[in-house]
Image: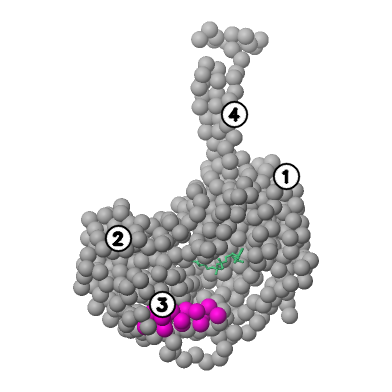
Amino acid sequence: MDTIQHLINGQMVAGTSGQTKPVFNPATGEQTREVALASVEDVDLAVQTSQKAYEEWRHVSIARRTKLMYAFRNLVEANVDEIARRLTAEHGKVLSDSAGEVARGLENIEFACGMAEALKGSISENASTGVDVQTVRRPLGVVAGITPFNFPAMIPLWTIPNAIAAGNGFILKPSERDPSTPMFIAELFHEAGFPDGLLNVVNGDKVAVDALLEHDLVKAISFVGSTPIAKYIYSTAAENGKRVQALGGAKNHMVVLPDADIDLAADAAVSAGYGSAGERCMAISVIVAVGDSADPLIEAIRQRTDNLVIGDGTDAASEMGPLITAEHRDRVAGYIEAGAADGADVVVDGRTRQFEGDGFFLGVSLLDNVTTDMSVYTDEIFGPVLSVVRVDTFAEAIDMIEKNQWGNGTAVFTRDGGAARRFQEEVEAGMVGINVPVPVPVGYHSFGGWNDSFFGDTTMYGPEGMRFYTRPKVTTTRWPDPATSTVDLGFPTNQ
Ligand code: NAD
């Protein structure tokens, strides 16, 4: 069995724990590889070598750093198809989705290529007579990224480029469920010419995560994953004196007003609810149908589900692939059962779709007349299940979103500018779409939700991300009085 190891100081190393976990191809259900689980000692070695690399890297010129970042960008772009192939083989999403996530990751490398602008400091001249004050942003040291299974290319790229551009060393602890893609990206990073040890990858589980959270030389933690783990990371990292940004789970609502273009809204609901099998933190999970939009919208979505092609992500005809594991597939299916038992109407039941082979497939589901006390509403399902909650007014929709535990993304579908603007102003979420179902910000803005979707104060990537990986240093300089200068300055100096 092929073992995915750790990348430490430019070398693949087996690690010392002797522990591994299986890695599957979700489309076939077969174990294809295994992944080594790092010990505390493996993590320490990774951190020590990254610290050594950082101590030199922070002195490397911006010109040189930029050149290397461009080389990395070009290598990732040249390898989009190969990254997508590896990604689909372990995650299961269709190849076009995999390539799409690499494209979103590239945006973050491109933002980091502009580091000369993003890292510029500021100066106040003559703050007092002959006194100048300047602020520069310095790196933190070694920083770590702990990432989820659902975007194994994009999410590591939310963090690595900015952290490295700013002069830090980086340790990545990717999801143990699909570790080949982030490892391949780290190999491309080395191929681009960055020094050994600057980016190390340790594979593993809680043992590796805890070792990072407790290591004195790790100065900041960037986490993306489920809410319970995000809370744990936030509190533990903070207790250990680290800077932390911890992005959690989500339950994203899409509000459809009676004046909306129903076809546009139904297309959006299908792609945002069922795309990547609903395993996206920005997936639409709840449709809030206002007034008489409900019946035509539900019918339009139902019709579209009939034609949805679900199959192996490597098949160009497939529009949706399998779920990540058999256990997760069964857990998602359990919510359809629970929704029906709670009194929701199961308009489309994904459990009735038949699939050949042992892949972790599940059909898509649509539940109507869901209420906010049902588990299909209160829990993050993270699968291809859309719940429709019917309300009478716009105000009820806003209120429902405000009362929900999370606040990652949300969207409104309407043709009314006033309603859209009101929604943008009032709604309780960090990322808002107006006729855009999945409003993931472009790489030169920043990404982060509100409430239980985000713990910390500096969101991820873009300008906020660059800020997270730097700390200000302010220097106050008193210049000698020009009158005392021994050089003839050629103009009056008594002012
Ligand atoms: P997860 O929380 O299970 O795992 C995330 C990371 O934490 C992995 O690297 C994992 O190894 C590690 N981890 C898991 N259990 C741990 C523990 N007990 N102690 C320490 N570390 C632990 O998440 P997942 O299942 O990989 O990803 C799906 C979740 O991530 C969903 O909840 C989804 O909404 C969320 N997510 C959020 C965003 C966002 O931007 N807010 C983006 C993507 C995914």
Residue at 56% over, 82% down: 326
How far is mark 4 from mark 3, CA to CA? 55 Å
Label 4 Cα neighbours within 10 Å, binned few <14 / some 14-19 / many ≥20: few
Sequence order check, earlier mark of 1 and 2: 1
Say few, some or many: other residues with alpha carbon within 10 Å of mark 2 (under 14 / 14 to 19 / 20 or more): few
Question: Can you tell which of label 3 and label 1 is closer to the viewer?
Answer: 3
Residue 80 lies within the magenta run: no
Within 10 Å of disc 3 (Cα), the crowding (few <14, some 14-19, many 20+) is many
The residue under label 2 is 399
**Marks 3/1: CA–CA distance:** 50 Å
Q: Secondary structure at mark 3?
A: strand
Q: Amino acid at mark 4?
A: Thr
Q: Amino acid at mark 2?
A: Asp
Residue highlighted by disc 1: 56
How far is the residue under mark 1 from the one under mark 4?
Answer: 22 Å
Q: CA distance from mark 2 to mark 3?
A: 23 Å
Position of 290 compared to 9: left or right? left
- Mark 1: which amino acid? Glu
| Residue 385, numbered label | 3
Label 2 residue SS:
helix
Q: Secondary structure at mark 1?
A: helix
Asked whether the viewer can see residue 222, the reply is no
Judge by depth and name the residue closer to the eye, 104 or 30.
30
Sequence-first disc among 4 and 3: 3
Proximity of marks 4 and 3: CB atoms separated by less than 8 Å:
no
Magenta stretch, residue numbers: 327-340
Q: Position of residue 50 (x, y in %)?
A: 72, 52
The residue that mark 4 highlights is: 475
